[in-house]
């Protein structure tokens, strides 16, 4: 059984650019949730994907968008990057949208200059 | 609005001592309360979790105490070891109207266990 994997591990972008982060869910999991963790803070829920559709969103603007593919892997896209987007982006996978336990990947560290 | 408040922000404990981290929540709909452990450069890993129908859950050296009426819960780490040095997050979740469950995290406690 493989765990949650994310790529890339680190990324540096400049303000105004666009970025795509990738996540492969744990084997057998069909739901992916994305979280943003600012330095020194707890993760904040961005959105969840289930059956290739967005299934709920936290308090994040539309320039944060995502995709889920038939193999349940997922992408997080952020347009028009702002300095405050610098954070660790975590994805978590689970079986089903209401499952209590979510398994996190190691995250992608994004730095916006 | 922060729905889960965590304290202290940082904690230094001697090896063999007891580490205690506290959390308070506001949303009475929360029905699942996990604790996550995060090492530098890693994602959060589930440590232990509790549901509000029990007041205490113990797994090895880790214990969650839950006070439903006070809307508070805490993590106790007995016989703390240097390898326990990490950041600990409490979290809470509930099912919304669409059957979706998302985690709401506290701000984290950085634990340092001195040898």
Image (cartoon, coloured by chain):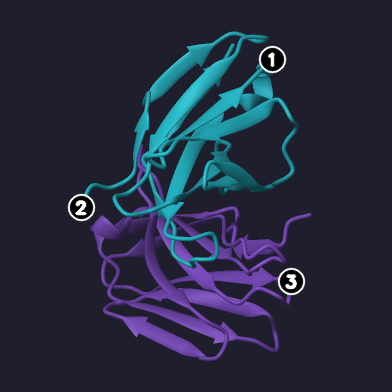
Chain colours: A cyan, B purple
Query: Height in image: B21 above or below A96?
Result: below
Question: Which mark identifies residue B27?
Answer: 3
Labels 1 and 2: the sequence-earlier one: 2
Image location (x, y in percent) of residue B64: 45, 79
Q: Residue at x 50, y 83 (%)?
A: B65
Q: Quadrant of residue B7?
A: bottom right
Q: CA distance from mark 3 to mark 2?
A: 35 Å
What residue is pinned by disc 2? A1
Left or right? Give the position of A1 relative to B37. Answer: left
Chain letter of disc 2? A
Residue B36 place in picture, x, y as percent: 43, 60
Residues at marks 1 and 2 on the same chain = yes
Instruction: Please state which of the two labelled residues, at mark 1 or mark 3, is closer to the viewer.
Output: 1
Which residue in the structure is indicated by mark 1? A80
Towards the viewer: A18 or A24? A24
Given this view, does label 3 or label 2 mark the residue nearer the observer? 2
- Is the Cβ of the residue at disc 1 closer than 8 Å to that at disc 3? no
Label 1 to label 2: alpha-carbon separation = 37 Å
- Examine the rendering and report whether any part of residue B67 can be seen: yes
Which chain does the numbered disc 1 sit on? A
Q: Dots 1 and 2: beta carbons under 8 Å?
A: no
Judging depth in this view, the residue of A107 and A19 nearest the camera is A19
Q: Can you tell which mark lies on residue B114?
A: none
Q: Is residue A100 above or below residue A85?
A: below
Corner quadrant of residue A60: top right
| Label 1 packing within 10 angstroms: few (<14), some (14-19), many (20+) | few
Disc 1 versus disc 3: distance between alpha carbons?
Answer: 34 Å
Disc 2 element: loop
């Amino acid at each position: 059984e493989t765990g949650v994997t994310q790529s890339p591990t680190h990324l540096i972008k400049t303000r105004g650019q666009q970025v795509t982060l990738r996540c492969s869910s744990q084997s057998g999991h069909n739901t992916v949730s994305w979280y943003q963790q600012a330095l020194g803070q707890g993760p904040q829920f961005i959105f969840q994907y289930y059956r290739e559709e967005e299934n709920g969103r936290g308090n994040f603007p539309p320039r944060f968008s995502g995709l889920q593919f038939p193999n349940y892997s997922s992408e997080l896209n952020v347009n028009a990057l702002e300095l405050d987007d610098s954070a660790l982006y975590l994805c978590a996978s689970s079986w089903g949208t209401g499952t209590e336990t979510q398994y996190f990947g190691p995250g992608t560290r994004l730095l916006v200059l | 609005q922060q729905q889960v408040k965590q304290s202290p922000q940082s904690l230094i404990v001697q090896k063999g001592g007891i580490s205690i981290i506290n959390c308070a929540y506001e949303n009475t709909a929360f029905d699942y309360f996990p604790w996550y452990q995060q090492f530098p450069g890693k994602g959060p890993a589930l440590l232990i979790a509790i549901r509000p129908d029990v007041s205490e859950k113990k797994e090895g050296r880790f214990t969650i105490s839950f006070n439903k009426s006070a809307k508070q819960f805490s993590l106790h780490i007995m016989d703390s070891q240097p390898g326990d040095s990490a950041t600990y997050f409490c979290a809470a979740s509930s099912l919304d109207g669409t059957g979706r469950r998302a985690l709401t995290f506290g701000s984290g406690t950085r634990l340092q266990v001195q040898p």
